Image (spheres, coloured by chain):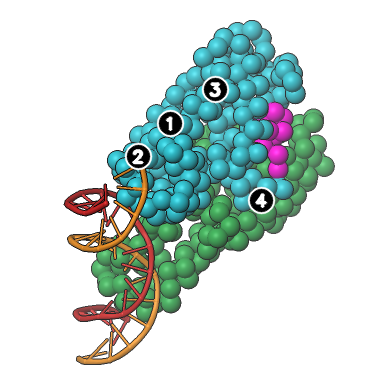
Chain colours: A green, B cyan, C red, D orange
Amino acid sequence: MRRRILDAALEVFAQSGYRSGSLREIATRVGMSEAGLLHHFPSKIELLREVLAHRDVRADRIVDRGGDDGLATLAGVIELARLNATEPGAVEIYCVLSAEATTPDHPAHEFFVERYASLRASMTTTFERLQADGRLREGVDPRKAAVRLLAIWDGLQVQWLLDRESLDMADEIADHLHRILTVRLPGC
Amino acid sequence: MRRRILDAALEVFAQSGYRSGSLREIATRVGMSEAGLLHHFPSKIELLREVLAHRDVRADRIVDRGGDDGLATLAGVIELARLNATEPGAVEIYCVLSAEATTPDHPAHEFFVERYASLRASMTTTFERLQADGRLREGVDPRKAAVRLLAIWDGLQVQWLLDRESLDMADEIADHLHRILTVRLPGC
DNA sequence: GTCTATAAACCGATAGAC
DNA sequence: GTCTATCGGTTTATAGAC
């Protein structure tokens, strides 16, 4: 039951954001009253927290950010981008909530500030390792490469959500990475 | 008075999005009742439309997308990015509303779909002209360059809004452009 | 566990006085 | 032009029955 609620909550928050997404809508989708729903999760914001944590586990299972094989990490990014194209809800919730949470008084503000700092740090390490192995093209700064990869990823999602015919997210990311690497990514 | 309302509305929609931003909050900021506010704008969504149109005029005045000097267009992009860093509200409203409007039933959905299609088209033309003049590096596709520039721009804004110390938007865009051009941009 | 009922607040918009 | 008063709707969350 908790699982079904989490799935419905992801859909609703993805479509309407946290502030405008309502418990009523979530409750309706799982065929339950609002009070029944709040028996499983103490409050709306606690429900949001669990939805976000759940999504992160999924992402981190596909992209191995801790490993020492930088090429494998980047291949994981492409794999996740390709998988996400088949699950629009997963794309929407990050796109919509990260933007909504840029204001400091949003309940998920700290979450996203820390998430992005963590992603920048681990991706910088990934590019540093690739640079040490001579796999990064001349003049590419690892930190800038990390910032730019995350930026492109997020930006492509906005354009793709607005018009799914306008681009292929995984192809675009792969193309970008091949312009800053000296080797081809495995499986691309 | 209309001007003061538009400024306040931009602030509120930027901070809370359209759906969660309230006329009450806007009215309070200009020191007026909600009814008084609705004398100047017939409805909330009409107010949003004018706020968005107002912002576009400002952007298009700085970035000359129609001209035939591609380098000047791209220099305008950098100039706008640098100016935006001094006006967070202008960044926020686009970031927050474009994400909120990805869902098809949002009142600004059509606006953003068309805006992005228009930006992609004019930027593609810009890069095609640069390519014809030999100013685009080997293997760079004009259409992909347009998609990527817009993606980077949007993505940088999210990261910047979450943590203003994490990056310099104009520097990052300039750096990216110099990696795909064969010449330096004027004034960079 | 799930329900109904309800509290307490907020929302956009309108009517009508001044 | 700007106000007060108000309508009908929404929201999250709690109390208490079953």
Tell me the magenta residue range: B167-175
| Badges 1 and 3, same chain | yes
Residue B163: numbered disc: 4
Q: Tell me the amino acid under the disc marked 3.
A: Arg
Nearest the eye: B131 or B3: B3
For mark 3, does the 10 Å Cα neighbourhood hold few (<14), some (14 to 19), or many (20 or more) residues? few
Q: Can residue A37 be spotted in the picture?
A: yes
Of helix, strand and loop, which one carries label 4?
loop
Task: Give the percent coordinates (x, y) of residue B22.
Answer: 40, 53
Q: Is residue B98 visible?
A: no
- Chain bearing tag 3 is B
The mark that comes first in sequence, 2 or 1, is 2
From the image, tell me which residue sits under label 1: B53
Tell me residue A121's x, y (percent). Answer: 72, 52
Check disc 3 and report its element: helix, strand or loop.
helix
CA gap between label 2 and label 1 equals: 16 Å
In the drawing, what numbered circle is on residue A166?
none
Q: Earlier in the sequence, mark 2 or mark 3?
A: 2
Instruction: State how far apart marks 2 and 3 are (Cα).
Output: 26 Å
Name the mark nearer the viewer: 2 or 4: 2
How far apart are labels 1 and 3 at the CA level? 12 Å
Q: Earlier in the sequence, mark 1 or mark 3?
A: 1
Quarter of the picture holding the N terminus of chain B: top left
